[in-house]
Structure formats: C-alpha cells, structure tokens
Image (spheres, grey):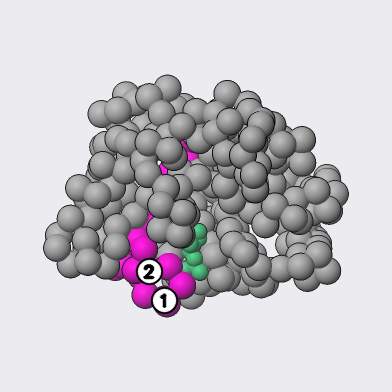
Amino acid sequence: MARKKLIAGNWKMNCLQEEGLSLAKAVAAKVKAQKWDCDFLICPPFTLLTSIKKCLRGTKIALGAQDVHFAEKGAHTGDISPLMLKDAGCTYTLIGHSERRVDHFESNDLICKKAIAAHNAGLNTVICIGETGAERDAGKTIKVCQEEINGSVPDDATAKNTVIAYEPIWAIGTGKTPTAADVQEVHAAIRKALSKKLGKAVANKMRILYGGSVKPANAKELLSLPDVDGALIGGASLKAEDFIAIAVNATK
Ligand code: 13P
C-alpha cells in the first residue's frame, strides 16, 4: 500500500514574527526549489498563522495549528475554534500532543471531541499518541497506544482527514529514540488497532508518523520502515536546513 509520506514540523511555543517568518520563508524556498513526492506541513504558534500563510502561497506546504477547541464559538476564553483556524488559512491541526495531555490534562475523550469538531469544520487532524518512559519500562507501550487509538480517534475518521503521530514521550526533545525494530513493531500494532476500529481499508491508507528526536542523522532509517509514513519533527523543524535534510529521506 503506497502512502505518500508527510513531513510535519511542530514549532511548539517558539518564534516571534521576524524569526518565524524568516524560518517559513527559508523552508518555502527550499521546498519550491525541488520536486518532492512527499507532503509538507508546518505548525507554527497561533500568533504566526496568518502571516506565515502568506509566505506559503504557491508552495505545497500545508499550514496547521497545534491545538483546537471543540466548540464552534462562544465563551471559551483563550481558546481557538476550528473555523477560526480555517479562517487563518489552516488545513490541519495537531491534537492530543503529549505536552497538551500533560500540561492541560487532556483526556482521550476530549481529544476525540476536538477531532470530531475539526473534521466537521473540514480540517485534517494529526492525532498524537505515545507512552511515557515508565510505561515503556513496564512493557505497556502497545497497550497504551491501543487505548489512545481507541479513545482519541473518532469512529468515522478517514485516511483523508486523519493522520496518527506516534511520539514516545521519553523520546521527545531528549535525543533518544527507540530502535528501528521497536518503532516498526509499535507502528504495526497501531495500524492493527486502527484496522480493528476503522476497518482494514482505512487503516491501510492512514498515515502513521513517527515523532521524537527525529534528526537528519536518523531520518533515513526511521523513514524507510514499512509502517512509518512520515515524521512529526519538533526541535529540528526550527532549522530550515535540518527540516529539509530530513525530508530528503522521505522521497523515493
Ligand atoms: P523533538 O523532535 O524536539 O523531539 O519533538 C518531537 C515532538 O514533540 C513533535 O511533536
């Protein structure tokens, strides 16, 4: 099953206007300069969305947010609705990143509600899952991922509107990664869980990204694994040359 790879940058809470714009411009120029057979996505902070949308015009880079609220509008101070993201030029949003699950106590139920609202508004979602170091040490990695798939992914998710990102929490920003064999084992288990929930046809088409200390040096090995359909990149997405050096490994 050929799945087009997706190279996604999660900028997290980084970059003011000037720095963000020059990073987006540098990425856009590098993406424009070459023919790619992968898809690109960048997810800057909310404050940069509208200005960055302008520099992505004419490129194949999609714009995404890092979170969304499930309500259409109303009394939710500090939150952003799916339609507001669309209005700002987004076609994607991340949902359920472990930093939100931990910092904002987001549950699988809430993440699922957000995904449904985003899909109803016509946004695509990247739903993030992954185990803690303690869960890994206790041999619970696959069980945790299955539970997060079952609880966070809407029953009617499609391969078009949903991407899964497997991000072992202990690998985020630490320079540590699971072995290639471990990544493949977990991705295959995630696809099996998706197949049980959404049917084999959808599961076979749905992209599963790996995230957690992806760098130019390990991208080739990770992106060549059969069930790895791209990468969700944190730190290395803040340098245009590293982001592109990772993407080079996603093309045939
Ligand atoms: P790092 O690439 O910095 O480890 O971050 C991964 C991540 O959390 C992307 O969402």
Residue under pointer 2: 171
Q: What span is colored magenta in the figure?
A: 161-180
Residue under pointer 1: 174
User: Does mark 1 have its CB less than 8 Å from ligand 1?
Assistant: yes
* Disc 1 residue crowd, few under 14, some 14–19, many 20+, Cα 10 Å: few
Rendering coords of residue 155 (x, y %): 38, 24
Q: Residue furthest left?
A: 138
The vertical placement of 166 against 12, above or below, is: above
Rendering coords of residue 25 (x, y %): 81, 62
Left or right: 125 as drawn, with respect to 188 = right
Left or right: 200 as drawn, with respect to 11 = left
Q: Name the kind of residue labelled 2 in the image.
A: Ala
- The residue shown at (57%, 39%) is 69
Q: Name the kind of residue labelled 1 in the image.
A: Thr
In what element is the residue under mark 1? loop
Find residue 80 and report its image quarter. Answer: top right
Residue 208 appears in the rendering: no
Residue 132 appears in the rendering: yes
Rendering coords of residue 107 (x, y %): 37, 44
Q: Nearer the viewer, residue 247 or 55?
A: 55
- The residue shown at (60%, 58%) is 9
User: Does mark 2 have its CB less than 8 Å from ligand 1?
Assistant: yes
Evaluate if marks 2 and 1 touch, with contact meaning CB atoms under 8 Å apart. yes
Left or right: 167 as drawn, with respect to 126 = left
Left or right: 74 as drawn, with respect to 23 = left
Q: Could you tell me which quadrant the N terminus lies in? A: top left
Distance from the alpha carbon under mark 2 to that under mark 1: 6 Å
In what element is the residue under mark 2? helix
